[in-house]
Amino acid sequence: MKHDYDCVIVGGGPAGMAAAIAMKRLGVADVLLLDRNPRLGGILNQCIHPGFGLSRYDRDLTGPEYARALESEFAASGVECLLGAMVLEISESRMLKVIAPSEGFAEISARSVIVATGCRERTRENLEIAGSRPTGVFTAGQAQNLINLKGYRLGQRVIIQGSGDIGLIMARRLTIEGYQVVGVFERLPYLSGLVRNKVQCLDHFDIPLRFGTQISEIVGKGRVEGVFAEKMDDEQRPIAGIREFFPCDTVLFSVGLIPEVDILKSAGLVPHPGRPIAVNSRFETGAAGIFMCGNALHIHDLADNAAKEGESVAHHVAQYLRSREEYAAFVTQSKPYRPLPVNARFNASFFAALEESGQKVCIVCPKGCAVSAKAAPCPRGAAYFAESEKGRYQTMTTTTGAIQEGSRTRLPIKSLETVEVGNLALKKKAIALAAEERLPRSPRGSPSSEAQFSVKVAGMDVRFSICD
Amino acid sequence: MSYDILIIGGGVIGCAIAKELSLYSVKVALLEKEGDVAEGTSKANSGVVHAGFNVKTGSLKARFNIEGAARFPSICEELGVPYRLTKKLVVAKDRSELPYLEKLLEQGKKNGSQGLSIIAGEAIRSVEPDVRGEFALYSEKTAVIAPAEFTIALAEVAHANGAEFHFNAEVTAIRRIGQLYEVSTADGLVYSATMVINAAGLYSDKVLSLIESHDRSIHPCRGEYFVLDRVNANFMKTAVYPVPPADGRGLGIHITPTTEGNIIIGPSAEYINERDDLATTKPVMETLKREALELMPKLKDVAFIRSYAGIRAKLFVAGGSSNFEDFVIEESRINPGFVSLIGIESPGLTSAPAIAAHVAREFVAPRLPLIPNPKAAATRRAAPRIADMSPDELARACEANPEFAEIVCRCNHISKAELRAAIDNPLGARTLSAIKKRTRAMMGRCQSGFCLPKIMETMLEDYGMSPESVVFNAPGSNVVVKYEA
């Protein structure tokens, strides 16, 4: 490995990989991508649910499939990559201190740096929730990692705080894995995630959602034994005296994401808690030549958008490297991005009115339109309404299968045909189990991604394939 | 199993005594009810090495505080643990609180506390720019240490010198048979010894009750803390205390920089019913924040990453005064060779080295010949940490062992090699809490979000543990459950 590059990209998630691919296309060849994990893809690898890639690939992919698609574009680009690499420091003059098992300690100098280090999750501690500190309390993404990648079982009876998309998706995921999700609590009077996810992740599995509800205290000495929840008024202040105890052995917090920018401290850039690092109109930070994109800069709703931002940053960096004058001519201090809008529309009365009027929320695409027998904005929406009126929701599903019998190492699998939701919830264990038994293997012993195999779900054969 | 001396309790006092006695040719075993040393008060306190002005003149507290503090710099060096001379300001908001500072100064001088002066106005700001307050008692000898790490280091030295450590060994019965004590533990084992040293901290009164009736009782007094991130925290160098509240429960909610560069705020002081009730409470958390921000407004720029509670072992004696009880360190009158240490609250950590020497000299030496053990060493080499290495050291370490280049904890920069050293600790404590205290993994801003899966994977793959056997500390604190298909 060399020790100086035109550009070093830190982080191999969607933003970092897309930036690397674009850099190569723009003629910047001297690029190194660093990622601390043993494989590229970042958090996408643990997001085994579908819904990725609609704009970049015009297909509905699972997280791992989306990661592999980006990874093959990246491999074709020929950009150099070092995995298992942790950046300990970036200096103001763009000297990176890096460790990696394959290289040991290395100092790498870069003419430009793109920080695409993603984000971390807000924890129970960040919310300053009182009570004891038993085990069984996880952040939603941590739980997703432990279940989907490591094959652990966390517990049985779960409460989820936070109605963001990760919380909703984990509610469904846990139900498919055979957990009992007691409820999803949302501090605000309205939904944080997509309406579509409320419908397909909660409603279809009869998981209750409570608005204006916040865990105020965690109880338990060894494992968590339950939580007290408070009712909040419309200004999100607890209403005195309304406190309810919910027994559970597992609590998940899905209460927001925080950009992971710790390595910028050594470059003299320190964010105020809760505020993003400032960048100019071309995504350059206050340290010359250090750029940012993806969730490290601000939280994105879709991986596609993080990837798109990676591409834009690549354009700016390519120009920065080509001609500092040309680059500087188009710099302003205005923010190049807009924070995600808050949509307070989807509150309890919205859902009540919807039900009263006989309308349904279409889940075919992320728009989440209201559809009825009389009106639907598109034919697919009309078809969805007709199908859903039968009361039996059909859905594709994803779960995991053991890589070998008796092994905890999992691979994500997805159904190639629709399954009735009711059956999914009832036969959840059977799916996971049957998949484990029947996961096909290539002659080398590792499962083949092309292989299809069928699993009996409520007496019906459903075809599955590996989606990684 | 028969010994010369059994120590009950693996807190800083028990471990300091074990280390002290391990330098002599006596057979020592320590019994601890939890899965590791430093699982109670010794891991949840401010970590301050006090200069000795807060304690009543003429008391054991004053004597051992002054003696202990003097020993700390050299002991920390011997043990390979951090010692940070932060110094300390006790801040008076206005002139009305000045008499308290004068009283403290006078008391400190009488106790033999060095480096004390009262400063005012800009002189305070030149020590700690953001502090609000008109007057301050400035103590140039106050320091901080990492209390759990210090306790572990004491235990490891004792262990290397031959002392035995038995974990998950809660003492349930003690009998005296002639010259011997028989101590039974919850796991059904019986230990016998000539001497018993009761250093059971919060449970020291209960342990004494196992052999005789007495009039002392421990009242648990909970202190809640906030931990702040290291990012943005380096503006603060000095421990900052308010004038202590008059009720004698504690030293007031103070702001203390830690050896790791974090800041801690606390502790509160609240009498509670259960000795293991470590819950934090909303009203106290809000008070901590408010009072700390009043003292130092700039703390608002630092992220609050965790709160926790510790419990003081407050001693009450029937008929005694309600707000000051001295340390009780004494041999039973009816059970010779049974020594109890009761009510060792603040400044217990500071006093620990002096208390250990006192126990060896005053109680053990008259009963057992303390012949120096020629093989014993008082020093320990700490496990290497990549976060403390220079680039050259890091390069060499990674070349010698690539696991130093494999990151486990991204917040605090802990490598796989450090994780292994912690799991392979000489005391044989194999819990997440043991790893946390030894490596500082899981203590950072992500609060184990990223490192927990990696730590568990290492415990399973490299140490053959089952997923459900990975516990935080006590049995029942498992992270995941058994997978039933």
Image: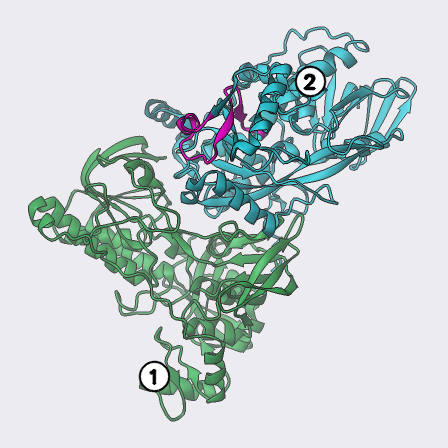
Chain colours: A green, B cyan
Contact (CB < 8 A) between labels 1 and 2?
no
Which quarter of the rendering shows the C terminus of chain B? bottom right
- The residue at 64%/16% (across/down) is B111
Q: Amino acid at mark 1?
A: Arg
Q: B160 or B279: nearer the eye? A: B279
Residue A377 in the figure: left or right of residue A457: left
> Which chain letter goes with mark 1?
A
Q: A438 or B164: nearer the eye? A: B164
Q: A283 or B297: nearer the eye? A: B297
Give the labeled residue for mark 1: A380
- Decide if residue A179 is in sight here: no
- The residue at 34%/75% (across/down) is A367
Residue B11, image x, y percentages? 67, 29
Which quarter of the rendering shows the N terminus of chain B? top right
Residue B90, image x, y percentages? 53, 29
Give the labeled residue for mark 2: B356
Q: From this viewpoint, which residue is outermost toward the right?
A: B178
- Decide if residue B322 is in sight here: yes
Q: A352 or A253: nearer the eye? A: A352
Tag 1 and tag 2 share a subunit: no
Q: Label 2: few (<14), some or many (≥20) within 10 Å?
A: many
Magenta span:
B120-147
Residue B85 higher or lower than B210, as above or below:
above
Q: Label 1: few (<14), some or many (≥20) within 10 Å?
A: some
Residue B410, numbered circle: none
C-alpha gap between disc 1 and disc 2: 79 Å
Residue A132, image x, y percentages? 63, 49
> Which chain letter goes with mark 2?
B
Give the structural element (helix, strand or loop) at label 2: helix
Give the structural element (helix, strand or loop) at label 1: helix
